[in-house]
Amino acid sequence: MNPSLAVGIDIGGTKIAAGVVDTDGRVLARRDIATPVGDRQSLVDAIIGVARDLASEHSVDAVGVGVAGLVDRAGEIVRFAAHLPLRDEPLRRELANALELPVVVDNDANAGGWAEARFGAARDAQDAVFVAVGTGIGGAIIIDGQLRRGWQGASGEIGHLIVERDGRPCPCGSRGCWEQYGSGRALLRAAEAAGLEAPHGAVVTAAAAAGDERARAVLRDIGEWIGVGIAGLVAVLDPEVVVVGGGVSAAGDLLIEPARASFRTYLTAKGRRPEPSVVLAALGPDAGLIGAADLARAGLGA
């Protein structure tokens, strides 16, 4: 009998990444397309189209979708997605009807964290936190080897922990949210203030790797803010490992070393407790689609 294959789809604000994933988390085929953000029907049609394209070439049993937004606990409704035209959208049912396959819908950070727990940097841990540092900050919580979604499915919105009272305004409507200090958006703001021409984070990372002290200082500051937030998460959740992923994590040691140092500074009861590991994600940009596919397969009882 052939191992079960599933399609995983990771829907971001600018790109839809999709792939066929096997039971070992290997991506056998992949498609990347621009995310249509003008209207919900164009977006839904694009998701259906890329899933059908992959399913036409491989015998797949299910489709998993990770969405950058709030998804209800049942995985039926996308309540809100800040960068996508989805508001109270019954996405799972619509996709399942169109594709005639079982479909699972979850938050994109949940999908990425699940992939790291199953196949990546948290594979041997029962308790882990995944911190996805991209344009904002998302997260996933793994306890006793299980993904925890919370009462309404909205757990893991860690980017909106308040780290500075009356701080920088956030699109969520609050002020002082963690992601206003330790995210890709914050990185670009800091780069501009430092006089760097940086249309995206990769430019800052490249400059830092080439020895630009301004770029290194920017990454150090972002990393230190990431460490502040991780210390708070560890105080609440006591994980064995914290995995830092997302696009900004591509800066590698230039980001993670300041984050580790800051985390140790602010860790409660430091020196009196074992420290969890703070590590970079292992699966890179494929984590979201790998996790979405595996969650879909788990939904079949596979």
Image (cartoon, rainbow, N blue to C red):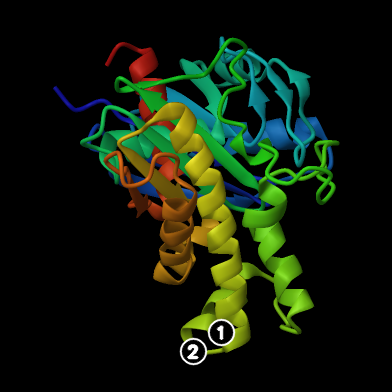
Helix, strand or loop at mark 1:
helix
**x then y, percent, for residue 19:** 43, 42
Q: Position of residue 174 (x, y in %)?
A: 83, 37
Residue located 76% across and 84% down the image: 195
Asked whether the beta carbons under mark 2 and mark 1 sit within 8 Å of each other, the answer is yes
Q: Quadrant of residue 143?
A: top left
Quarter of the image for residue 190 reads bottom right
Q: In the image, is residue 31 above or below residue 288? A: below
Circle on res. 92: none
Q: Is residue 36 left or right of residue 112?
A: right
Q: Amino acid at mark 1?
A: Ala
* Residue 56 visible, this orientation: no
- Residue at 64% across / 59% down in the picture? 184
Image height check: is 136 above or below 247? above
Q: Which residue is mark 2?
A: 210
Residue 113 occupies quadrant? top left
Instruction: State which quarter of the image contains the C terminus.
Output: top left
Residue 85, percent across and down?
A: 79, 34
For the N terminus, the image quarter is top left
Question: What kind of element bears circle 2?
Answer: loop
Q: Nearer the viewer, residue 148 or 286?
A: 148
Q: Which residue is mark 1?
A: 207
Tell me if I can see residue 144 in this picture.
yes
Up-down relation of residue 123 to residue 206 (above or below)? above
Seen from the viewer's position, the closer of residues 170 and 104 is 170
Mark pair 2, 1: CA separation: 5 Å
Q: Residue furthest bottom?
A: 211
Say few, some or many: other residues with alpha carbon within 10 Å of mark 2 (under 14 / 14 to 19 / 20 or more): few
Mark 1 Cα-neighbour bin, 10 Å: few <14, some 14–19, many ≥20 = some
- Residue at the spot x=81%, y=45% of the render? 170
